[in-house]
Image (cartoon, rainbow, N blue to C red):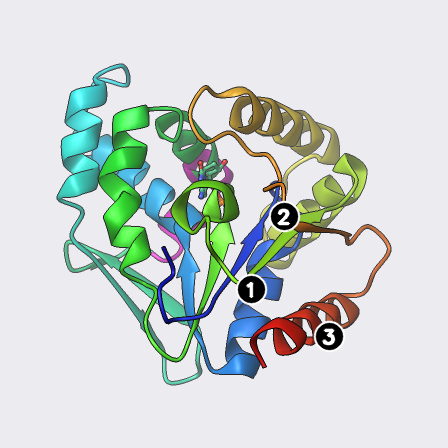
Amino acid sequence: MSGAVPVLTIDGPSGSGKGTIARRVAERLGWHLLDSGALYRLVALAARNSDLESTDEAAHARCAAGLDVRFSSTPAGDEQIWLKGQDVTAAIRTERAGDDASRVAVMPSVRAALLERQRAFAQPPGLVADGRDMGTVIFPDAEVKIFLTASPEERARRRHKQLKDKGLDVSLAALSREIAERDRRDSSRAVAPLVPASDALILDSTVMPIDDVVDQVLAVVRQRVG
Ligand code: DC
């Protein structure tokens, strides 16, 4: 599926650090980056903007198929995401947007509508794909598959710090409950649940500094891809 273009998949639950790790590894390798979670967040936001009925799967699938999105970066190198020409970078990163994304992500026809769009990110010289089903469904033939985990307590703590750094005051207990609920929904859905691919390397980042995880992932990629 990944063809001649080398693909590294990084899957795992919310707060495992995969977004940060994927971005840093892509920068170090000079490869493209697919943040598949952003696509589900965008579908949820577009659906909300269009007042779609939350149970209308066909309408959500049409919304996913017609998603008018553009990814860019600021001169400082920060990501920018545009939905129908509107800057939604901050809007899709809220806890509500994550929760909404997890709800639309259970819809099989939404997932199907996003399949080819995700595979199209595999362009030379390589792709780092971050998500829940990158190694199992989207790029089953990827050269390197990583499944990144961390304890639920540590993931809640990291998320809490991220939000606090952005000036948002959310209780750690409430975040822990939300993360547990999102884990349950993402792992138990019928289509493309969050599970490690059988050939994935499982890394636990609970007590590992980010730089060490990045170095370990880069070492595996260099060993397999050269
Ligand atoms: O990685 P994230 O927090 O941005 O993802 C938001 C939600 O999107 C996540 O709770 C489940 C869904 N998702 C998915 O189902 N499959 C993916 N490949 C990526 C995200």
Q: Is mark 1 within 8 Å of ligand 1?
A: no
- Dividing the picture into quarters, in which one does residue 157 lie? top right
Report the amino acid beneath label 1.
Ala
Secondary structure state at the residue bearing disc 1: helix
Left or right relative to 12: residue 210: right
Q: Which mark is residue 215?
A: 3
Q: Earlier in the sequence, mark 3 or mark 1?
A: 1
Residue at the disc numbered 1:
22
Q: Which quarter of the picture shows residue 169?
A: top right
Q: Residues within 10 Å of mark 1 (few under 14, many from 20)?
A: many
Mark before the other along the chain sequence, 2 or 3:
2
Q: Circle 3 — which element?
A: helix
**Quick one: quadrant of the N terminus?**
bottom left
Calculate the distance from the C-alpha at mark 2 to the C-alpha at mark 3.
Answer: 20 Å
Mark 2 highlights which residue? 199
Query: Mark 2 against mark 3, which lies toward the viewer?
Result: 2
Callout 3: 10 Å neighbours few (<14), some, many (20+)? some
Residue that appears at 62% across and 40% down: 196
Magenta span main SS? helix
Magenta region: which residues?
A: 89-97
